Image (spheres, grey):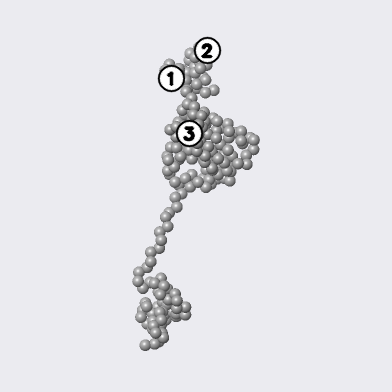
Amino acid sequence: MSEAKEITSTESEGNHPNLWNDGGNRSAESRGTPAVRRRLPDERHSLTHHFSVGGQEGYVTIGLYEDSLPGEMFIRMAKEGSTVSGLMDSFATAVSLAFQYGVPLQVLCDKFSHTRFEPSGWSGNPKIGYAKSLMDYLFRWLELRFLKGEQGILFELPKLVPPQPQGGGGVVKALGQVVGLGDAPACQFCGSLMVRNGSCYRCMECGSTSGCS
């Protein structure tokens, strides 16, 4: 039974004055303030996200208020049976009611993130990585999307730096000079490729020749 229903039954019966007096000192104002549901408009924007956890694919759709805060959740799993479908629909309905009755999103994310059960595995999402369960993935994604602005990428690949050409006289330069020579021999003194010099070859590294003057 929710707190709002407990308040209603307490006020109507009036036979349990100490129902809320469980060691704390709750004020009469807090006992007489029912939860207010904030319904979404008939036409609302939504966000649909595809996910995969341990090979189990699905879609989560988040209905949004005018201020872009989440107000409802729909979860659709691929290859699901009637039991899984009913459980996911019921859970999504419970989360939607929590959104509309003002439960902070951070509280839900802290509660359901890192819960562990199957299916679990790599999600393919670089912002999340390994997900311990479907609930773990969904609420970590909600936290990244609505609370952190999709920050905190866990596996950001390093940027590749193109190699810089070596200075004058290097092997790369020597290879570039003899691309069209084909049968150019290697220098017997330093091992570098030689460059044609008239009818002979000359080494650009050490200056030696192949025998011609």
| Badge nearest the viewer, 2 or 3 | 3
Question: What residue did someone put label 3 on?
Answer: 64
**Proximity of marks 2 and 1: CB atoms separated by less than 8 Å:** no
| Mark 3 neighbour class, 10 Å CA radius: few under 14, some 14 to 19, many 20 or more | some
Q: Amino acid at mark 3?
A: Leu
Quadrant location of the C terminus? bottom left
**Proximity of marks 1 and 3: CB atoms separated by less than 8 Å:** no
Q: Secondary structure at mark 2?
A: helix
Single out the residue that lies furthest toward the right. Answer: 82
Q: Amino acid at mark 1?
A: Ser
Question: What residue did someone put label 1 on?
Answer: 30
Q: Position of residue 53 (x, y in %)?
A: 55, 44
Q: Secondary structure at mark 3?
A: strand
Closer to the camera, 200 or 114? 200
Q: CA distance from mark 1 to mark 3?
A: 29 Å
Q: Is residue 15 above or below residue 75?
A: above
Task: Give the mark nearer the N terminus: 2 vs 3.
Answer: 2
Q: Position of residue 92 (x, y in %)?
A: 55, 33
Residue 113 visible to the viewer? no
Q: Position of residue 96 (x, y in %)?
A: 52, 31
Report which quarter residue 85 is drawn in: top right
Single out the residue that lies furthest toward the front. Answer: 43
Closer to the camera, 209 or 180? 180
**Proximity of marks 2 and 3: CB atoms separated by less than 8 Å:** no
Q: CA distance from mark 2 to mark 1?
A: 18 Å
Residue in the image at 40% along x and 75% along y: 177
Q: Position of residue 201 (x, y in %)?
A: 41, 82
Task: Give the mark nearer the N terminus: 2 vs 1.
Answer: 2
Question: What residue did someone put label 2 on?
Answer: 13
Residue in the image at 46% along x and 28% along y: 102
Report which quarter residue 206 is drawn in: bottom left
